[in-house]
Image (cartoon, rainbow, N blue to C red):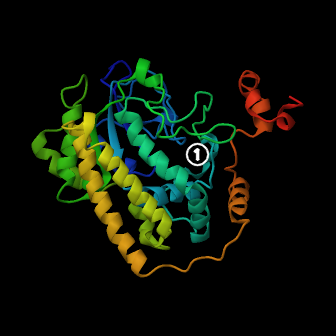
């Protein structure tokens, strides 16, 4: 697209590691338009931008330049480990200028198993909620699960995430003033990958883009060919390139209790979007259909885990603190440490009262 084309804008949103790369490759094949990235947004109207917002790994850099949302979802049983693989590949970096130094390592190797277990046991409860809240954010048109002053959206001290009760939550101003956040289509990563359902899932994307200002979408009869070329013969690496060495994806497991939590969350989300105001809403029906598949897959694995349980580690009262210390050692500690926040002159007076007297007394 030229700089003055002013195309109709589409936001492609997903929880991290939910198949975004496969999706944008398919979309570029559909449209011939390069999909932009939230961290590299230049201010020019790209036409299509990908993001993980509101997850803390995404940013809202595109202002009010977009017009609609496509939501991409993946089974959390696989999305959460895959997210950790990406963190390992970028050496747990947080700042974009540091991440960029490791960008060529993405989709090359799965994380060392000891690191996966530590990260999983520290972050699981948070990430399974963030996976669900990511869907809620768009379906509920900006449901803000974080507190206003938590600009990192991480729920870390001195802040915390909201809980299901009470609801409704506040609405993210971006979804009031910048964009209609309700998704025009919900896309399943698993269906997009499948030879049988992939072209149909890609057609859902095409239908949302077709007819929009300065959006050229390939003819419907060619979508099967585009799916084949964009996925089977993809030029850029994706999640499956990690299969060339190391442990298989299935080796990265959850504990029995964590798998039960995944099932509980999937069932909660399925029940939520299958009744009440969501009844007969097409995108909610799509979510329910996908969740049914996820529930069946996780239940099947969980049954085998119950039949053949893994050894239970001996109790260790220091375990959680050891995980916290490890996470800080790899550079992913508290983003709101008092020493860091004190340096934010405009911000510190707003949050000083949230820290205890010992932390605040010298500020």
What residue occupies the far front of the structure in this picture?
A: 166
Few, some or many C-alpha atoms within 10 Å of disc 1 (few <14, some 14-19, many ≥20)? few
Q: Quadrant of residue 234?
A: bottom left
Name the residue: 39% across, 70% down: 302
**Left or right: where 116 falls relative to 142:** right
In percent of width and height, residue 179 lies at 38, 23
Viewer-side residue, 295 vs 62 = 295
> Is 239 rendered above or below residue 209?
below
In x, y percent, where is residue 4?
Answer: 36, 18
The residue sitting at 48% across, 22% down in the picture is: 173
Q: Nearer the viewer, residue 81 or 200?
A: 81
Quick one: quadrant of the C terminus? top right
Q: Is residue 108 above or below residue 315?
A: above
> In the rendered view, would you say 361 is above or below 195?
above
Dividing the image into 4 quarters, which one contains the N terminus?
Answer: top left
Above-or-below relation of 8 to 286: above
The residue tagged 1 is: 100
Q: Is residue 238 visible?
A: no
The residue located at (72%, 67%) in the rendering is: 317
Q: Decide if residue 144 is in sight here.
A: yes
Q: Quadrant of residue 155?
A: top right
**Side (left or right) of 213 relative to 94:** left
Residue 74: horizontal and vertical position, in percent?
36, 52
Q: Secondary structure at mark 1?
A: helix
């Amino acid at each position: 697209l030229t700089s003055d084309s002013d195309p109709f804008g589409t936001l492609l949103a997903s929880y991290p590691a939910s198949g975004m790369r496969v999706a944008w490759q398919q979309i570029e094949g559909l449209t011939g338009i390069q999909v932009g990235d939230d961290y590299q947004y230049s201010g020019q109207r790209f036409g299509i931008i990908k993001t993980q917002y509101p997850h803390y790994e995404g940013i809202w850099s595109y202002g009010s330049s977009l017009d609609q949302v496509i939501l991409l979802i993946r089974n959390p049983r696989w999305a959460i480990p895959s997210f950790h693989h990406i963190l390992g590949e970028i050496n747990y970096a947080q700042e974009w200028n540091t991440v960029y130094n490791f960008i060529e390592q993405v989709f090359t190797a799965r994380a060392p198993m000891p690191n996966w277990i530590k990260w999983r046991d520290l972050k699981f409860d948070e990430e399974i909620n963030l996976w669900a809240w990511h869907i809620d954010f768009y379906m509920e048109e900006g449901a803000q699960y974080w507190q206003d002053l938590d600009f990192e959206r991480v729920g870390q001290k001195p802040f915390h995430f909201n809980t299901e009760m009470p609801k409704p939550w506040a609405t993210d101003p971006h979804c009031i003033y910048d964009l209609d956040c309700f998704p025009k289509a919900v896309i399943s990563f698993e269906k997009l990958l499948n030879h049988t359902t992939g072209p149909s899932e890609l057609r859902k994307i095409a239908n949302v883009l077709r007819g929009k200002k300065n959006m050229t979408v390939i003819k419907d009869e060619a979508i099967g060919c585009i799916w084949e070329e964009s996925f089977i013969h993809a030029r850029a690496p994706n999640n499956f390139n990690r299969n060339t060495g190391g442990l298989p994806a299935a080796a990265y497991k959850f504990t029995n209790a964590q798998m039960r939590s995944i099932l509980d969350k999937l069932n909660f989300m399925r029940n939520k979007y299958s009744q009440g105001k969501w009844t007969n809403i097409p995108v909610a029906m799509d979510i329910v259909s996908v969740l049914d598949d996820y529930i069946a897959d996780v239940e099947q694995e969980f049954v085998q885990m119950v039949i053949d349980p893994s050894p239970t580690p001996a109790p260790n009262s220091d375990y959680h603190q050891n995980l916290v210390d490890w996470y800080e050692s790899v550079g992913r500690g508290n983003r709101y440490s008092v020493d860091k926040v004190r340096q934010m002159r405009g911000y510190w007076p707003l949050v000083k009262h949230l820290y205890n007297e010992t932390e605040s007394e010298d500020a």
